[in-house]
Amino acid sequence: MVKTSELRMKDVINVVDGRRLGSVQDFDLDLEAGQIKAFVVAGQSRLLGFLARDRDTVVTWSQIEKIGDDVVLVRIANYSQAAP
């Protein structure tokens, strides 16, 4: 079992292109089922965090490939750095 506090400290890596997406920022919970439906990966800061930040990414539970000791591996086939 993985605690949410431990999950927040792990880097999220997309296995499709090897890109580091960021770290877990928030969770989408199903309170009735007691399960995590998705988590939000915070966009990386640009220009030392003063002006802007990349978009946040929502990763559904089905997109998670593996939760390791240091990283969370996800499979997002159509991920792009372009803003929506």
Image (cartoon, grey):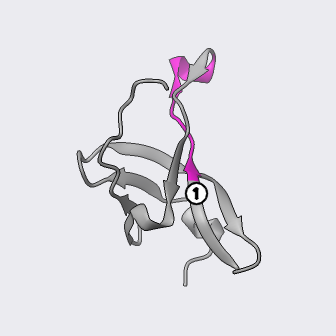
Residue at 36% x, 52% y: name it: 13
Residue 64 placement, left or right of 53: left
What x and y, as percent, mark residue 68? 39, 71
Is residue 46 found inside the magenta-colored segment of the image?
yes
Residue at 40% x, 24% y: name it: 82
Q: Is residue 77 above or below residue 73?
A: above
Residue 43 placement, left or right of 18: right
- Quick one: which residue is furthest to the right in this view? 31
Q: Mark 1: few, some, or many residues within 10 Å (few <14, many ≥20)?
A: many
Along the line of sight, the residue nearer the viewer: 67 or 75: 75
Q: Is residue 77 above or below residue 55?
A: below
What x and y, as percent, mark residue 57? 51, 43
What x and y, as percent, mark residue 32? 76, 78
Q: Visible in this render: residue 71? A: no
Residue at 43% x, 66% y: name it: 62
Residue at 63% x, 17% y: name it: 50
Magenta span of residues: 40-50
Along the line of sight, the residue nearer the viewer: 55 or 7: 55
Along the line of sight, the residue nearer the viewer: 58 or 1: 58
Q: Quadrant of the N terminus?
A: bottom right
- Mark 1 lies on a secondary structure that is strand
Q: Visible in this render: residue 9? A: yes
- Quick one: which residue is furthest to the front in this view? 32
Instruction: Give the residue at mark 1.
Output: 39
- Quick one: which residue is furthest to the bottom in this view? 1
Residue 19 placement, left or right of 21: left
Q: Amino acid at mark 1?
A: Phe
Total count of labels: 1
